Image: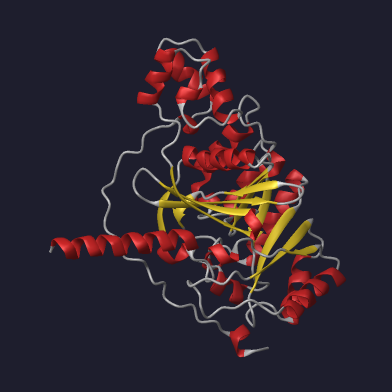
Amino acid sequence: MTQASQTMTTPTPLRTIRPRRPRQQRPTTLHDLTLAELEQRLVAQGHQPYRARQLFHWAYQQLALDYHAMTVLPKALRQHLAETLPLTTLQLTRTVTSDDGETEKLLFRTVDGEHVETVLMCYPDRTTVCVSCQVGCAVGCAFCATGMTGLIRNLSAGEIVSQVVYAARLARERGRTLTNIVVMGMGEPFQNYDATMKAIAILHDPAGFGLGARRITLSTSGLVPFIDRLAEEPYQVKLAISLHAPNDTLRSQLVPINRRYPIAELLAACRRYVAKTGRRISFEYVLIRDVNDQDHHAEALARLLHGLLCHVNLIPLNPTPAAPHLARPTPDRIARFAAILHRHGIPATVRYSRGVDIAAACGQLRAQADAEAAIAATSSTDQHA
């Protein structure tokens, strides 16, 4: 065992210094409302309830980004809605592409001046959007850029839905249909559970976006009570667990929430989930050179997952300035790790991160934007001093 695999020093996060922004009341948007809530709102204002279905159709099937395009609605209603119920409060501020245009990262600005990341990924057989559920993250994984700034706030259901609508519109412009959603961007979905599940309900509604629940994946760092709660939900979404280590000592260094919910409790919850739902769990395992990528780690992981209906996604580390001391393993080491799992009957796939050259790993583009904003604010202050 190498010294690096015995102990790993996690550096103190270097938090970006940003100018204080005044808190603003975030208005309710159309993307925040379920169909029933929208009907109730319209009826209370004296409109016919069928107008809600028309709005859902235009918002989620036509992917309209403003009310003026919804010509099926009376002009007076369109004007009223534009003044009282914005479709979205997210503003697209930057897009960057990679992988010959097959990966596009979107940076949004929220109404209160924060930044949110979304990634659209086009594959031969599917088109997937990776969405964020929080600004920042409280989990603080050792290799994640998002966690370096801590948690700023939760996103609303509408802010989550808006990311999907923007991505679906972009995919349509390319002649493609959005087929999958993964909630694997900034934030921990189970720490914003209600808003995340409401967003899923809105996107699943056949009157609107109509995406099958099995095409939606939630990724968690391992909040055990919410794994049990998800098993009781009516939506057959997929569950992914960010595991990253086969023992408590190492996982507590990489994923600090393990100190609250250690591996034994986490795996017990996973087994309850599979028994209740009959659905397979995916385990995400970021491979980090000389930290969690050795043969004995693979052997221990195979023993840990033996007998569980699962699949392991091996993700070679996406280098980030947030953790310059961590590196990606060699291709041979990655292949050997996967081979050991296969030999023990554990299904595993190596999945390289998309968009490495455009900072597509979680939190990197946001960190760049925040740093630029801080520099601009400092320059403005200096000029007026």
On-image quarter of the C terminus: bottom left
In the rendered image, the vertical position of residue 137 relative to residue 218, given as above or below: below
Q: Which image quadrant for residue 92?
A: top left
Tell me: 380 left or right of 37: left
**Colouring:** secondary structure
In the rendered image, the vertical position of residue 85 relative to residue 259, given as above or below: above
In the rendered image, the vertical position of residue 75 relative to residue 385, given as above or below: above
Residue nearest the viewer, comparing 312 with 274: 312
On-image quarter of the N terminus: bottom right
Tell me: 35 left or right of 154: right
Q: Is residue 150 visible?
A: no
> How many labels sit on residues?
0
Image position, residue 343 (x, y; %)? 87, 72
Q: Which residue is drawn at 34% across and 49% down?
A: 113
Tell me: 337 left or right of 172: right
Q: Residue at x 38, y 51 (%)?
A: 114
Tell me: 384 left or right of 278: left
Image position, residue 172 (x, y; %)? 63, 38
Q: Residue at x 33, y 59 (%)?
A: 373
Residue nearest the viewer, comparing 59 with 157: 59
Residue nearest the viewer, comparing 130 with 307: 130
Image position, residue 162 (x, y; %)? 51, 39
Image position, residue 310 (x, y; %)? 77, 57
Residue most toward the left? 385
Q: Is residue 196 visible?
A: yes
Q: Residue at x 62, y 31 (%)?
A: 209
In the rendered image, the vertical position of residue 352 relative to residue 176, given as above or below: below
